[in-house]
Image (cartoon, rainbow, N blue to C red):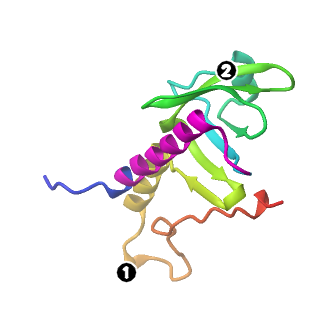
Amino acid sequence: MSRSIDYGKLMHEAMRGLIQRVLVGVQDNGLPGAHHFFITFDTTHPDARLADWLKERYPSEMTVVMQHWFDDLEVTVDGFSITLNFGDAPETLYIPYDAIKTFVDPSVEFGLRFDSQDDDEELDSEADDAPDEDDSDPDTHSTSGEAEVVSLDSFRK
């Protein structure tokens, strides 16, 4: 049985730690300057908490915006809770860090994207099913080893 360092998992933990540190700063001091966040998370995550009507409206994922109005931000080791306004209806959400799919601060063109474990398993499965180099079609290109680039152009003003 071979052992190896899981760099992907370590990197995701470090990036989630970065989000936690940023949110602690916002909890303590508010949003500085023009900073604001678009946070997309998995609404089916077992530890995510949101109102039933939001789960019905967003059955797989949801993007929330922390900008002009939010309240009761509480940052913990595993996630954060926040009250946001949905059409003049304040709702409290709990978002575990493990449920976060993207974290973007368009004011400084910064973004993080997390692949879910299912995505990783799907890529591993695709890699297992891939033909050997000798019998592969020369026009077929594998993308499982390529990095995904998140464009922030859509968030620019």
Q: Is residue 143 above or below residue 7?
A: below
In the shown orientation, is residue 97 left or right of residue 27? left
Residue name at image x 65 percent, y 42 percent = 39
Of badges 2 and 1, the one in the foreground is 2
In this view of the protein, which residue sits in the foreground, 75 or 151?
75
Q: Residue at x 50, y 69 (%)?
A: 146
Image spot of residue 123 (x, y percent): 45, 56
Q: Quadrant of the C terminus?
A: bottom right
Q: Position of residue 90 (x, y in %)?
A: 77, 20
The kind of secondary structure the magenta stretch mainly shows is helix
Query: What residue is rendered at 37% in x and 59% in y?
Result: 128
> Mark number for residue 143?
none
Q: Residue furthest right?
A: 87
Q: Furthest-left residue in view?
A: 1
Residue 16, magenta (yes or no): yes
Highlighted magenta segment, given as a residue range:
10-33
Q: Determine which residue is flagged by label 1.
A: 134
Residue 33 placement, left or right of 42? right
Q: Label 2 vs label 1: CA separation?
A: 55 Å
Nearer to us in this view, 71 or 138: 71
| Residue at 67%, 42% in the rendered image | 31
Q: Residue furthest bottom?
A: 138
> Mark 1 belongs to which amino acid?
Asp
Q: Earlier in the sequence, mark 2 or mark 1?
A: 2
| Res 41 → quadrant | top right
Give the secondary structure at mark 2: strand
Q: Residues within 10 Å of mark 1 (few under 14, many from 20)?
A: few
* Residue 85 % position (x, y): 78, 26
Residue identified by numbered label 2:
92
Q: How many marks?
A: 2
Q: Residues within 10 Å of mark 2 (few under 14, many from 20)?
A: some
Taking depth in this image into account, of 26 and 151 the one nearest to the observer is 26
